[in-house]
Image (tube, helix red, strand yellow):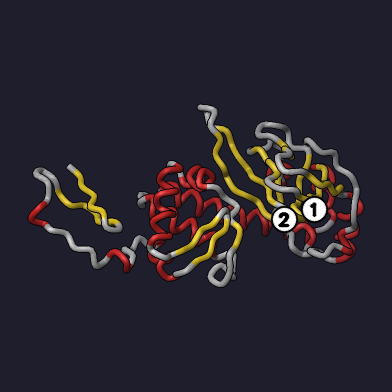
Amino acid sequence: MSCACKVIGHCMDCPVRGSSRLCDVPDDVLREISAEKQQASYAAGSILYREGQPCRRAFAICRGEVRLTRTSADGSRTILKIAKAGELLGVGEAIRNTEYVATAEVMKESSLACLGREQLIGIMGRHSIAGTRISQFLGWECANVFVDVCLLRQTSSAAVKLGQFMMRWVETCPHCCDQWISIPYTHSDIAQMLGASRETVTRLLSSLQRKHVLQMKRRRLRVIDLAALRRVANGEVCEHNRNVTVDMDNLPPGRSLTRVADSNRVWRT
């Protein structure tokens, strides 16, 4: 790690207490966790742990964001998720006593609480409520991973995958239709998570802006038409495109019309 842990603050007085499964426990359990945990601030770019390293610590994100990536056989990195405040990192590996399955990189200045593997296992053994809370988090994480796998393996178009990805993210931001919200992903990040090219993601997002489904400015987003975005996620044609007409008598020789997107004709031999 690029920053040494130091004991700061007390969980009992934390303004965001209860935001994490690990701290959503009775006072006596939280006092023990507070006494045993270490709190550290990390600058953007700091590495909490690397893929393949033995798991020695688990983390709770109190403030900030952490990107989890995994390296493929050809050396390219794939973003698995961007963990936010309240989420836990490394608890699955700590419980199984295995190596970290991903590299955890701090995206912006963050504050994290960390517990040694032995400390975490000890607290779970002494307090069933702590074990229950961590199990709930792991169950929630497994369900999300299952949805991600289905998204990648389905045969839908890149537009549908992007629509579903945007809907999943937008649904966690209740004010996305009323105000601008920050986007934690670059176009390259989204492309990696969807198994698409950056150019494809950029083109599709530009199309959604032209159709007045959403607005984007410098890593910020505002949804204009949530119903239209939902239709895209469901694979339906946007109302903006349903009135497009095609002159069937002027098709190029040997070609057939397969799809109409925006005002462009898409042909296939």
Which residue is found at the position 53% from the left and 32% from the top?
76
Task: Examine the image and state in which quarter residue 141 appears.
Answer: bottom right
Report the residue that reaches farthest toward the top: 74
Which residue is found at the position 42% from the left and 65% from the top?
212
Residue on which disc 2 sits:
134
Report the amino acid beneath label 2: Ile
Residue 64 image label: none
Q: Secondary structure at mark 1?
A: helix
Question: Residue 190: horizontal and vertical position, in percent?
Answer: 51, 48
Q: Quadrant of the C terminus?
A: top left
- In the image, 28 versus 262, the foreground residue is 262
Q: Residues within 10 Å of mark 1 (few under 14, many from 20)?
A: some
Of the residues under marks 1 and 2, which one precedes in the sequence? Answer: 1
Q: Please state if 196 lies on the left or on the right of 175 as rendered.
A: left
Question: Residue 200: horizontal and vertical position, in percent?
Answer: 40, 46
- In the image, 197 versus 209, the foreground residue is 209
- Vertical side of 208 occupied by 69: above or below: above
How far apart, in angstroms, are the residues tagged by discs 1 and 2?
9 Å
- Vertical side of 119 occupied by 178: above or below: below
- Kindly check if marks 1 and 2 are in contact, taking CB atoms under 8 A apart as contact: yes
Report the amino acid beneath label 1: Met
Residue on which disc 1 sits:
124
Which residue is found at the position 78% from the left and 41% from the top?
57
Q: Quadrant of the N terminus?
A: top right
Question: Residue 225: horizontal and vertical position, in percent?
Answer: 44, 69
Q: Secondary structure at mark 2?
A: helix
Q: Please state if 190 lies on the left or on the right of 19 as rendered.
A: left
Which residue is found at the position 79% from the left and 63% from the top?
16
Q: Residues within 10 Å of mark 2 (few under 14, many from 20)?
A: some
